[in-house]
Amino acid sequence: MSTLTVREARIRRHKRVRSKIAGTAERPRLVVFRSNHGIEAQLVDDLEGKTLAAASWLQLKKSFKGSKTKQASEVGKLLAENAKKAQIANAVFDRGGYLYHGRVKALAEAAREGGLKL
């Protein structure tokens, strides 16, 4: 009986979610990646295998001060802006195996407030 590491368990959950979710050009998949330092999100068309829009904590201004949750909500707003530029209004949310609370939830809610329909 082997126990999974935290990363292995997340990857297993992500595979389970990905078996049910796929993004198209009209409704891309919003993928979230969370690290210890920041958070990244991108809109992916799985049929073409292309990223249509993306946002990262590295794109925030250097003068940004706040918690990681505030950082995630800023990234969500930035992603919504980039989606508007790419003329994307709808998306399918892929939490990437992470629990839907905290930073992941803040990013999703900020993207919704920015005009993206998840």
Image: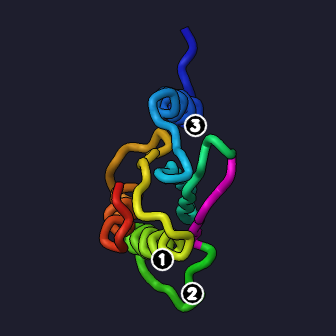
Please indicate, yes or no, whether residue 60 appears anywhere in the rendered image: yes
Please, what is the three-letter code of the amino acid marked with disc 1? Glu
- Badge 1 or badge 3: first in the primary sequence: 3
Residue named by callout 3: 7
**Residue 53 is a magenta residue:** yes
Please, what is the three-letter code of the amino acid marked with disc 3? Arg
SS class, disc 3: helix
Which residue: 54% across, 46% down? 24
Give the quarter of the image for residue 43. bottom right
Give the left or right position of residue 39, taking residue 58 as reference. left
**Residue 95 is a magenta residue:** no
Which residue: 34% across, 47% down? 100
> Do callouts 1 and 3 mark residues in contact (Cβ within 8 Å)?
no
Q: Residue 83 versus residue 97: which sits nearer the camera? A: 83
- Tag 1: Cα neighbours inside 10 Å, few (<14), some, or many (≥20)? many
Task: Give residue 38's position: percent from left, percent from top.
Answer: 55, 65
Residue named by callout 2: 61
- Furthest-top residue in this view: 1
Which residue: 39% across, 71% down? 73
Residue 81's label in the rendered image is 1
